[in-house]
Image (cartoon, grey):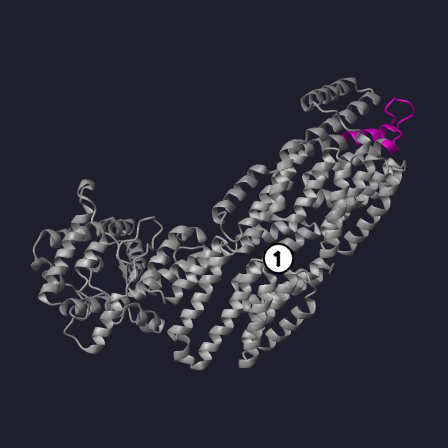
Amino acid sequence: MASVHESLYFNPMMTNGVVHANVFGIKDWVTPYKISVLALLYDMTASKTTLPERRRLNKLILPLQQGPDLTLGQFLKTVEECCPQTAYAVKQRLQEMADGELKDMEYFFSTLPTPFTAFDSEAYKTSVVGLFMRHMLLAYNKLSFSQVYKLYKSLQLYYHSHYAKPADGRVSLPALVADDSDMDLTSTEDTVGDRIDREELDTSLHESELRNDNTPSSGPLSQKQAEYFLARQAYLLKNDENKALKPAALQEELNNMLKFNPDFAEAHYLNYLNSMRVQDIFLSAHCLLHYFDRLILSGNEGKSNGDEGYGRSLRYAALNLASLHCRFGHYQQADLALQEAVRMAQESNDHVCLQHCLSWLYTLEQMKGSESTVLTEDSVKMAAHFCLPYLASLGIQSLVQQGATQGKTAHKLMDALKDTDILHWKHSLSELIEISLAQTTSIWRMYGKSTMALQQAQLLLNMSSLEQVNFGVQQNNTEAFAVALCHLAELHAEQGLYCAVSDILQHLKEQFPPHSQHAKLWMLCDLKIQFDRHMNEGKYHLAEPLVTAISALNKTEGLYRKAQVLKALNRSTEAYSVLQRLQVHCERTKCTEVVIRVMLSTAELHWESCGFSTALPLLLQALALARQHHLQSLASETILHLAFTQLMLGVPEHALSVLHEAIEPVLAHGSVMDKGRALLLTARCQMAVAGFRPNGQGQADFHLAGLAVDTLNEAAGYFSKLNCKERLRDVHYLQALLHRSLGQTSHCHKSAMLFRLLDQELQSPAPPVSMRL
């Protein structure tokens, strides 16, 4: 079977002729660069190349033909990367023409093996290569003698400028184009229609750089080359922003385009996308409005659809403006634009536009914190009725997200996602498949099932895209991938694998630059990991400055982290005030997870004043909320707090019994810190049940004391992973007391020495072991 790239030489009916019908128009110029491409095609047929080299060259043909004119150095470098032998042959052929006479260029065109003159030509008449050769031959044969002479002089200048010394000054392509500006396919002696084509050529656009090297603009760009550039940059912005031009460079190129043709609608739209990259609300709204203005004024919609075309553009202009304001948090302006779009869609009976409006309406209500379940359900029903699977799936995913925050059971949510996944695979909606996997990862993490969350994240990261991938781009810069990688980083941080966390965050920073849309995800993730690490290591002076940065990205997380730092610095009054303010805010916004964490932190503040009885109602309320919303990790953490409170109230038997309920999920899915805390608390309960007394009085149960020693050793291993020296100091203190009561003098001295070393290193008084979990 013929290779896909070999179809460049064969009949375009294989691809319905759609691509080839629009690739080459009669307005392209005869330039020295195009002669270089012809020389490449000639040497590809004349020389013998290996199959891998031929495939690479075949893949290169279309970008070279459609792209802007390159300098000779860029052209030869590009060909040399595919086949050095062919690059050398092309260079020799160009040298023969440039260093020879005009007849050498004439001889080249006369001996060119085209599908129209050579019976054994590899190129089919109506293939991409065949059409290109035909176009160039027709253009060359139509040139007058003076135009042929100018073309030859331009070819000489094109070739020798590559070898010019820096002192001589480098000759750029704009100078060449100025010389051969009259060498287009049409001439001044042609008909009126040809003169119109010539006028359109005079409005050709400034050349932009298609490749990733940061070379300056170098010459004019035809309409089709400009469209190719815009399509490529838009594709890269969607799928791999790092391979697109930098925001400033792209802005400069677009400004140059619009300077030559201010009514180029597609350039305004790409300008809008570029402005969104840098969060420029004014310029993005300005460019979006200009895009729809130019689209309507140019008549592109009206030519095919009559008056309906104009109305359709206006409807979607209002809808896009609403989505823009939603993204920047301008809810009132978004609501007004959405109402306008709905009104126009109802007047024209446009059901598809109405469904898009309804989708944005429930999204807007969610952003404002209002109840939107009924709107979302209506949107899903209507989207299914009008056979719009994309909008229906988005609605179901939104319902799943709302259900997760409202305490729906996991099996119901997973069943709903399974049904949408069937729809996604049926219609090859790869973007929604990615969102579904990222959403499943988040749900499992919320429920406290870290193993399942890790599995889903890995599944997403190893999934191949269903969409056609061009320009060597892999679709891995979507929000779903950013969410999955952030979850992966946090899961590794919870297990103390900070080297792996550093690698993941480095990849996130490269894939999502700071100016990109989803950069805030990894920024917040990075700050939270740093904060938790400093808190675990007892470096509160390093954790405190991070609170401001976290608050800038997420106010709720910032307030919670601020309360944690204040509590660690023994500023209990300030911490309590922050926690109360945060609880009121989270209850209003229905953020159940943070409400439970606030209750646990408030209970810890009551412990510091020995208010263990006061803490019990708070803990019981937090446990009820966690179980109601099926938050297993928070429920287990609440049970640990309850067990500690019971231990302090003098009922260690009940505390140990309660601990047995929580220890298994903590060891299976909890973080290293949670495992260490749970085992330390278990050891203390075992010591209390065994009748152990610090002063050595009373008869202790040596069996339970031995179990407590083993439990403390295991807890010390977990705390060592996190370099949590304050917790290790507590463990060594309890180990020394246990070994002393068991008569194990050498072990007692070892634990006492370790305690002493850590106490001297920390240079801070150890808080009472009985005052914290």
Horizontal side of 284 relative to 757 (left or right) equals left
Graded by Cα atoms within 10 Å as few (under 14), some (14 to 19) or many (20 or more), the crowding at tag 1 reads many
- State whether residue 520 is above or below residue 503: below
- State whether residue 598 is above or below residue 399: above
Q: Amino acid at mark 1?
A: Gln
Q: Label 1's element?
A: helix
Residue beneath label 1, please? Answer: 439
Q: Which residues are magenta?
A: 688-710
Quadrant containing the N terminus in the rendered view: bottom left
Horizontal side of 62 relative to 303 (left or right) equals left
Q: Nearer the viewer, residue 121 or 730?
A: 730
Residue 464: x and y, percent?
49, 57
Q: Residue at horizontal 17%, vertical 51%?
A: 159
Q: Residue at horizontal 54%, vertical 77%?
A: 344
Horizontal side of 100 relative to 412 (left or right) equals left
Residue 585: x and y, percent?
73, 52
